[in-house]
Amino acid sequence: EVQLVESGGGLVQPGGSLRLSCAASGFTFSSYSMNWVRQAPGKGLEWVSYISSSSSTIYYADSVKGRFTISRDNAKNSLYLQMNSLRAEDTAVYYCARDFVPASEWLGYDYWGQGTLVTVSS
Amino acid sequence: SSELTQDPAVSVALGQTVRITCQGDSLRSYYASWYQQKPGQAPVLVIYGKNNRPSGIPDRFSGSSSGNTASLTITGAQAEDEADYYCNSRDSSGNHHVVFGGGTKLTVL
């Protein structure tokens, strides 16, 4: 069974840092590209960042570029999001999500974690 | 970057058919995927590609697309279908980003 379990969320002051983790199991983690997607309280979904299976390709949403860093450790089946210079508008539930790419065509995210809440407030 | 537009709220009588739409320029180039999200839960993929359902998704869910509009249709809506529904696709700006629609809250009456 595919499982994605996020951790590392919490309360942080504006300007502070936080590192999120996503532990993957039930599939060959090193074969899949992964993403972070966030959802502010009462709001919609927002794609945050993408990392390819080998970490060779990385993308960020404009809203987090220069402040957030995505990484992965395939030996540990883990995905990370280092968040620096946090702002109130970064307050959200952060989900890790697996890329769904059957036949080499991206078709969405087929598995999601349960999310971890990040609250940026003084 | 591209945008995807959804109606904020839609309602349907129990057992009737409802269509939820998603509009955006990126849909002329890429398929939309559809997600169902119930309160306090993670999104679940319900439709992907031209009109495909992941294992475990009831066949009352279907998808279609024409021009810049993708649609999710629920034929014979059930009480458990009450949820928020989101579409997403690749961004057509060529930056490999992903865009989500703003979501549609479906109420089953």
Image (cartoon, rainbow, N blue to C red):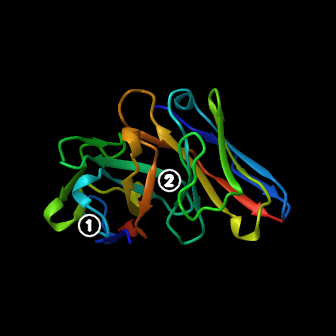
- Looking at the image, which is closer to me, A97 or B50? B50
**Could one spot residue A80 in this view of the protein?**
no
- Looking at the image, which is closer to me, B33 or A22? B33
Which residue shows up at 26% across the image and 67% down it?
Answer: A21
Which residue shows up at 62% across the image and 29% down it?
Answer: B68
- Looking at the image, which is closer to me, A54 or A85? A54
Label 1: chain letter? A
Instruction: Name the quadrant containing residue A87.
Output: bottom left
Which of the numbered marks, if any, corresponds to residue B103?
Answer: none
Q: Quadrant of the C terminus of chain A?
A: bottom left
Label 1–label 2 contact, CB within 8 A: no
Q: Is residue B39 left or right of residue B21?
A: left
Give neighbour class at mark 2: few <14, some 14-19, many 20+ (Cα, 10 Å). Answer: many
- Residue B28: give x, y in percent of width and height: 56, 27
Mark 2 belongs to which amino acid? Leu
Residue that mark 2 sits on: A45
**Could one spot residue A98 in this view of the protein?**
yes
Q: Is residue A113 left or right of residue A44?
A: left
